[in-house]
Each structure stands twice: as structure tokens, then as C-alpha cells.
Image (cartoon, rainbow, N blue to C red):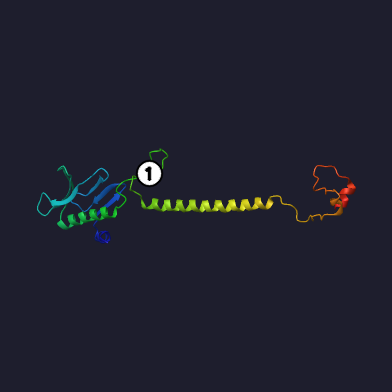
Amino acid sequence: MRRLAACLKGGYGSTADVIDGKLVLSFTDAIRPVLWQMDLTSVKTSALEMVDGPEAGQFGLVLRAPKGEVQDIALFSTRDAALEALVTVRNALSRAHGQIRPVLPAPDGTGNVAPPSGYVPGWQGKADAHQTAMKWIGGLAGLVILAILLNMLWSLSPRPPSSIATVAPSSSESQGFRSPQETTGEPVSADDFLRAQ
């Protein structure tokens, strides 16, 4: 909203974003406009603070490191402009959850990216869930296909024909005659075979 109001008034305003683990600040409304960046992965602790400028009525933003080093970032003509720039930086850092550590290349050299431990970008969590769902669907489809193939094999397996009637024992069997089914591999005369039918 402030950016829209600043654009309508003809001003540019301050902007801050976290991109690939870097804090990028654009202070176009400073006395000397500046575009500034800082690598957040190498910074452990630091303070961005508003200080009095070299002349009365000027205010600046400086980066104060733990070792006492002070780096000037931008100088503003009013306290409100410097305070608005500081709040803009705070808002950018608070929105940067999960973006401060950049994604590192995979150690296996495949070109795929491997995030550092504990860091999962929002898009990757969705992709992992999609891949997991696709694995489950693929596994279930494989089981269904396996069941269909087993059913087809079972239906093609040989079974004794149901149209052949069983032969009732006859008087010739009691006399030592055996049916051709019982004498597999033994020669039988045609008359005996036809009588058994």
C-alpha cells in the first residue's frame, strides 16, 4: 500500500526482499539512492540500526557487526523515511521464512538440488507429496494388473473335461476286464475299447 501511495506521489520508496539467501535493499528515497545486498548465510548476528546523520535532521541506517565493525548503508533526509526503511527491512526478513538458506547442489553430482538439513522450500514439500502419492497409485495399479494376470492364468490351466461320463462297473470288470482309462500305456483291442464305451 505504501509503495502504491509512493508511486502516486511520484516517489519511489524503500524496498527489501530476501532472494536466494541474500537480503536485497533498495533505498531510492535516500539522499544518495543505494541498492545494497548482504549474504545472510554467512552472517551469524548483526544489527541494522538507525543513527543520527552527519548533519542535523539527517538519519542513516548502518549495519553493526558483533566485532564492532560499522557499515553505512543509506542516509535519509527525515527520521520518518529512515524508520520506514528499517521497518521495510524487518518485514522482508519476517516474510523470508525458509528462504534465508539457499538450496545447495547435490553432492552426488546429478544436478539435482539437495536442501540443507531442516530446510524444505514450499514447492518441494508439494512435489514430495505428489511423488509419494504417485508411488502408491503405481503400486496399487501393479497389484491390480498382477491379480488380473493370475486370474487369466488360472482360467487357462488344464482341468478334466466335465463332459466325459464315468464308467459304471460292469460284469466284465468283475471278470478282470479293465477300462482303457485304467490301462494307460497297454494295448487294447478295438472290440474291448468299444464295449467299454
Q: Position of residue 187 (x, y in %)?
A: 85, 42
- Left or right of residue 115: residue 91: left
The residue located at (89%, 47%) in the rendering is 190
The residue located at (25%, 56%) in the rendering is 91
- Left or right of residue 114: residue 159: right
Quarter of the picture holding the N terminus: bottom left
Q: How many marks?
A: 1
Q: Decide: few, some or many residues near mark 1? Use Cα within 10 Å; few <14, some 14-19, many ≥20.
A: some
Specify the amino acid type for callout 1. Answer: Ala
Determine whether the residue tagged by mark 1 lies in a helix, strand or loop: strand
The residue located at (88%, 52%) in the rendering is 195
- Left or right of residue 110: residue 66: left
Quadrant in the picture for residue 90: bottom left
Disc 1 target residue:
114
Task: Tell which of 181 and 86 is nearer to you.
Answer: 181
Quadrant in the picture for residue 66: top left
Q: Residue furthest front?
A: 175
Q: Residue furthest right?
A: 191
The residue located at (18%, 56%) in the rendering is 83
- Left or right of residue 146: residue 26: left
Q: Position of residue 58 (x, y in %)?
A: 13, 53
Task: Tell which of 11 and 150 is nearer to you.
Answer: 150
Q: Position of residue 147 (x, y in %)?
A: 59, 53
Q: Position of residue 99 (x, y in %)?
A: 31, 50
